[in-house]
Amino acid sequence: MDLIFGANIDPAHADPAGTSRLASRIDQAGLDLITIQDHPYRPAYHDTWTLLTYLAARTQRVAFVPTVANLPLRPPAMLAKAAASLDSLTGGRLRLGLGAGAFWDDIVSMGGPRRSPGEAVDALSDAIDLIRSLWTSPAFGPTPSRDLEIWLGANGPRMLDLVGTKADGWQPSLLHMGLDRLPAASARIDAAATLAGRSPGSIRKVYNLAGTIGSPSAQPFHGSVRQWVDQIVELVGKCGMNGFVFWPQEDHHRQIDVFAAEVVPAVTASIKED
């Protein structure tokens, strides 16, 4: 599976013009993905689905991924309809990132259910089944493209198993799934896929990297371009990761430019050499 690269945009509404400019910059830089987190209960944030649609209409080629859609606040049948519609309208530029939910007090404050960890995983599993059944139903429309995949934000054992058995992709984050845990988590997904009769190599594995490109540092993904390149290449070989999304912690425009112009080509060249 080819490597893909992207950048994150926060859904903050303080500077709408700046958000639009950043999306255009990512698109023009040739990155593959724009990810946007989904926390509608935060007053500083736009609604993610609305923002995805707005930015998709103002870009040409880059794909969009909610990281990840808040299932307790987004009923699965409506998600299926919304995702298929945006996929159709953008010519296949959507991947449906799904999450079981977190911040339950905030979810309840917006009218959502409160679920235990087990209930949340069960609800997500059921949602995947329902969404897929709708997408393949002759009574449903629009018919989604083959590019409309379901990616899960997953950290715990049952969620990792769910990725392996039912999902098309996995979206872990460095902040929640550290480098010490990533190899075992990736291996668990592969094992679950094999038991389910699926090819582990068919699963997209996209690591969200919050960090800074700059001076050399001992901290992962806070260092020079060369350090970033070496660390990403290692994750490809060691953990089977095949996608990376940059979450810059400062100076977003310049950092994304450096990532697209220097890190990505060097990683691609290094992988080809190997």
Image (cartoon, grey):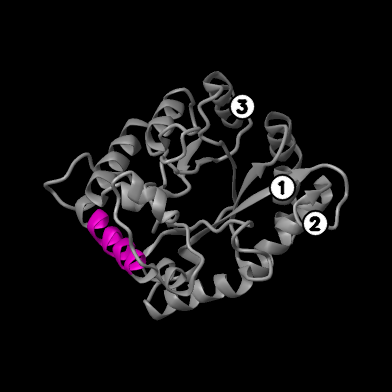
Three-letter code for the amino acid on which mark 3 is drawn: Arg
Q: Which residue is mark 1?
A: 211
Q: In the image, is 237 to the left or to the right of 194?
A: right
Residue at the spot 43% in from the left edge and 33% down from the top edge: 52
- Mark 3 vs mark 2: give the one in front: 2
Element marked by disc 3? helix
The front one of 29 and 50 is 50
- Mark 3 vs mark 1: give the one in front: 1
- First in sequence, mark 2 or 1: give its number: 1
Mark 3 and 1 residues: CB-CB less than 8 Å, in contact?
A: no
Three-letter code for the amino acid on which mark 1 is drawn: Gly
Q: Provide the residue span drawn in magenta.
A: 119-132
Three-letter code for the amino acid on which mark 2 is drawn: Gln
Residue 152, given in percent of the width and then of the height, sits at 44, 58
What separation in Å lies between label 3 and label 1 (alpha carbons)? 19 Å
Residue at the spot 38% in from the left edge and 31% down from the top edge: 50
Q: Which mark is residue 25?
A: 3
215 magenta-colored = no
Element marked by disc 1? strand
Q: Please identify the residue farthest to the bottom as the structure is shown.
A: 195
Q: Which mark is residue 219?
A: 2
- First in sequence, mark 3 or 1: give its number: 3
Is residue 86 something that shows in the picture?
Answer: yes
The C terminus sits in image quarter: bottom right
Mark 2 and 1 residues: CB-CB less than 8 Å, in contact?
A: yes
Q: Please identify the residue farthest to the right as the structure is shown.
A: 216
